Amino acid sequence: NGKDQRPICIVMGNEERGISDKMRELADETFYLPMCGFAESFNLSVATAITLAYMSAVSGRGGVVSDDDDNSDGGISDSIKGPLRPGDLYPQELECLKLKGVLNSLAQKRVGKAALKREGIVLPNSFYNN
């Protein structure tokens, strides 16, 4: 299915208002996370983590969980690939993300910038602000 090969964008709404009507109108698909128990809603970080964990698990199995699957045990459809796949980034994009992660993990951001500068590596300020 060619649809599975397209880039995806997940828009998460807030607890109170969800996503805008315009965003919902433009979306190819929408979903909600079912709740059980006494909680009224997941906070945004929890909802995002659940969503990405599910998508990653489904992608790792090479399919999606489907109620109308031919398997009687509610199994996995092997003909549909999940949306998360390794290798979607160019190598330089991956290295850039790793570097940003390392720099952002430093308690003092200027230390990383100074260390790079000592090695003759000067990055634009926008690199540090994203």
Image (spheres, rainbow, N blue to C red):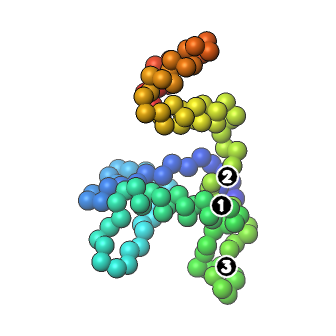
Q: Does the residue at mark 2 contact the one at mark 1 (Cβ under 8 Å)?
A: yes
Q: Does the residue at mark 2 contact the one at mark 3 (Cβ under 8 Å)?
A: no
| SS under mark 1 | helix
Instruction: Report the amino acid beneath label 1.
Output: Ser
The numbered mark at residue 75 is 3
Asked if residue 10 is positioned above or below residue 33 in the image, the reply reads above
The numbered mark at residue 129 is none
Q: Earlier in the sequence, mark 2 or mark 3?
A: 3
Residue indicated by mark 2: 85
Residue 62 at x, y percent in the picture = 71, 64
Q: Residues within 10 Å of mark 2 (few under 14, many from 20)?
A: some
Asked if residue 71 is positioned above or below residue 127 in the image, the reply reads below
User: In the visual, does 80 lie left or right of 21?
Assistant: right
**Residue at figure coordinates x 45%, y 31% from the top left:** 130
Instruction: Report the amino acid beneath label 2.
Output: Arg
| SS under mark 2 | loop
Q: Earlier in the sequence, mark 2 or mark 1?
A: 1
Instruction: Tell me how far mark 2 sits from mark 3, CA to CA.
Output: 20 Å
| SS under mark 3 | loop
User: In the visual, does 39 lie left or right of 34?
Assistant: left
**Residue at figure coordinates x 70%, y 83% from the top left:** 71
Residue indicated by mark 1: 59
Instruction: Report the amino acid beneath label 3.
Output: Gly
Of residues 15 and 96, the one nearer the viewer is: 96
**Residue at figure coordinates x 43%, y 33% from the top left:** 107
Q: Quadrant of residue 53?
A: bottom right
Q: Does the residue at mark 1 contact the one at mark 3 (Cβ under 8 Å)?
A: no
In this rendering, does residue 25 appear at all? Answer: no
Q: Quadrant of the N terminus?
A: bottom right
